[in-house]
Image (cartoon, rainbow, N blue to C red):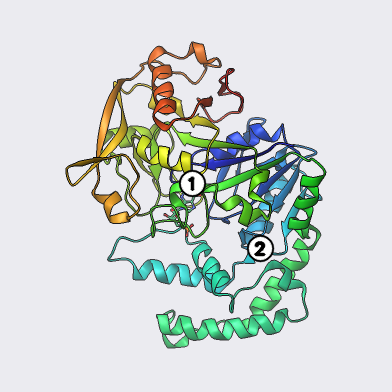
Amino acid sequence: MPATCVIGLQWGDEAKGKVVDLLTQQHDIVVRYQGGANAGHTVVAGGEVYKLSLIPSGIFRPGVQCVVAGGTVLNPEALLQEIDGLTARGVQVGKNLMISDRAHVIFPWHFEEDRLMTDQGADAESIGTTLRGIGPCYRDKVGRSWAIRLGDMYRASFRDQIEKVAAAKTRSLSSLGAGGETFQLDAGRIFQQYSDHAERLRPYVADTTAYLLDAIEAGKRILFEGAQGALLDIDHGTFPFVTSSNSSGAGVAAGAGVPGRVVTKVVGILKAYCTRVGGGPFPTEQDNQVGQHIRDRGNEYGTVTRRPRRCGWFDAVAARYTVRLSDVDVLAVMLLDVLSELPEIHICTGYELDGRRIVDFPSHVDDVRRVVPVYETLPGWNQEISDVRHYDDLPTAARNYVSRIGQLVGRPVGLVSVGPDREQTIVVKSQNI
Ligand code: IMP
C-alpha cells in the first residue's frame, strides 16, 4: 500500500500544510513525526484560515486518523490550546487524534534554557530559535538522565521524576545565570500543572508505533508530514543553524517508528524562491528591494513568531542537494504568484568558492557563508497568476521558470501553487503527485 512523505526542501515554511491537506484525501492516516510547536502550518479550509503547530493537518478531513508520533517534542499546554481552538471552531478532535506515549515533554526549564542560550549567543550570530524549548528538550532526550516522556506522566514515579529533574535544573540554570541567586523551580507546582494536562490528554495517548505497524500490515495508506525543511536538519542542514531534529526524509523512520522502506513516494516541497527565519548562512539572500517585494507579496512573516523572514532567489544547488538527500520523486513548487511583476528572475545554478566553481552544497557552515552564487537570469511575467488553474494557462515565462527549476534539481514538478486556497493549485497532469 502506498505511503507518502512530504518533506520541505529549504529552510522551512515551504507551505507544506497545503500539500499535506490536498494529499490527505488519498490517505487514511496522517503522521507528524519530528519537531514540535516550533512548526507553524497554515491550512485554508472552507475559506477559514487555521494555524496548526503539532496536530497534523489531516484533522480537517473526516475519517482520517491523525498521529503525533514518538519523534516529536510536546508542550502539553500548547497542544491542549490547539485542540481547544479547533474544537471551538467546530473541528472534531477525538478518537481521530492519537499521541505517542514515547514523545518527549517540554517543561518550563526548557523554555528558560532556550532563552538563556539565545541571550548568551547574542554577540555572535545567534541561531535565533523559536524559543519554544525544542532544542533543550531534544538535548535532554539524547542525554537521557533528565528526559521525561509523555508516558512517564501516567506513572506513580512521575512526582519523583519531576522533583529530581527540577532540582538538577535549578542547579544548572542558576549556574547559567538564570534569575541570579534566587532561581528556583517549583517542583510541586509543575507536577500539579503537568498532571492536570496529562489527565486532559489521556484520551489521545497511545502506543502509536504499534498502531502504525499494524496499520502498515493492514494495508492502510499513510502520509508522513515533515516539519521544517531539510536545510534545517540536525545532521544534514547548515549546522549549527538548524533545528534539533531530522527534518529531511532521514527523519521519517526514526521519528514515526516505521521501517524506512514503507515510504513509496516522497513529495518534495519548494518555494519558488527561498526564505529563512533566524540566523545562519543564506547564499541567495536579497537584503534589498527584491527581498522586500517577496516579503510583502508572500506575507513572509513567521507563523509562530511573526519574525520577518529573510528572502532571496531560488537556490538550485541547495535544492538539488536536499532533493537527493530525501530521494524526492516529485516536486511541488509553491508561492509562484509571489514572483509576478518582477521584470526578471534569478536562479542560482552554482556556487563559486575561492574562485572555483562547485556543484555540491558545502558541508561546513563557514563555506556556505563564503560561497558566491552564480545566477542565471530568466524573464519575469507581468500578469497576476493567482486565478490560473491549468498549467498551460500560465504565462510562458512562468512555465519556463517552473520547468527550469525541475531541470536544475533533477526531478519533475507535479504541482504548482498560486495562492493559499485549496483551489489555487495547479496539478501537472502528466505527473502523478
Ligand atoms: P528551533 O527549532 O526553535 O530550535 O529553532 C532553530 C532554527 O530553526 C531557527 O533558525 C528557527 O527559526 C528555525 N525553525 C524552527 N522551526 C521552523 C519552522 O517551522 N519554519 C522555519 N524555520 C524554523
x 41%, y 19%: residue: 398
x 42%, y 32%: residue: 409
Q: Amino acid at mark 1?
A: Gly
Q: Under tag 1, what secondary structure? A: strand
Q: Which residue is mark 2?
A: 103
Position in image of residue 69 (x %, y %):
68, 55
* Residue at the outermost front position: 261
Position in image of residue 39 (x %, y %):
54, 51
Position in image of residue 423 (x %, y %):
60, 23
Residue 152 in which image quadrant:
bottom right
Discs 2, 1 touching: Cβ within 8 Å: no
Q: Nearer the viewer, residue 278 or 194?
A: 278
Q: Nearer the viewer, residue 216 or 197?
A: 216
Q: Amino acid at mark 2?
A: Ala
Residue 185 in which image quadrant:
bottom right
x 58%, y 78%: residue: 146
Placement of the C terminus among the 4 image quadrants = top right
Rate crowding at label 2 as few (under 14), some (14 to 19) or many (20 or more) other CA atoms within 10 Å.
Answer: many
x 56%, y 24%: residue: 424
Position in image of residue 135 (x %, y %):
49, 64
Q: Which residue is mark 1?
A: 229
Placement of the N terminus among the 4 image quadrants = top right
Residue 184 visible? The answer is: no
- Mark 2 and mark 1 lie on one chain; the one further toward the N terminus is 2
Q: Is mark 1 within 8 Å of ligand 1?
A: yes
- In the visual, does 162 lie left or right of 214? left
Residue 310 visible? The answer is: yes
Rate crowding at label 1 as few (under 14), some (14 to 19) or many (20 or more) other CA atoms within 10 Å.
Answer: many
Q: Under tag 2, what secondary structure? A: loop
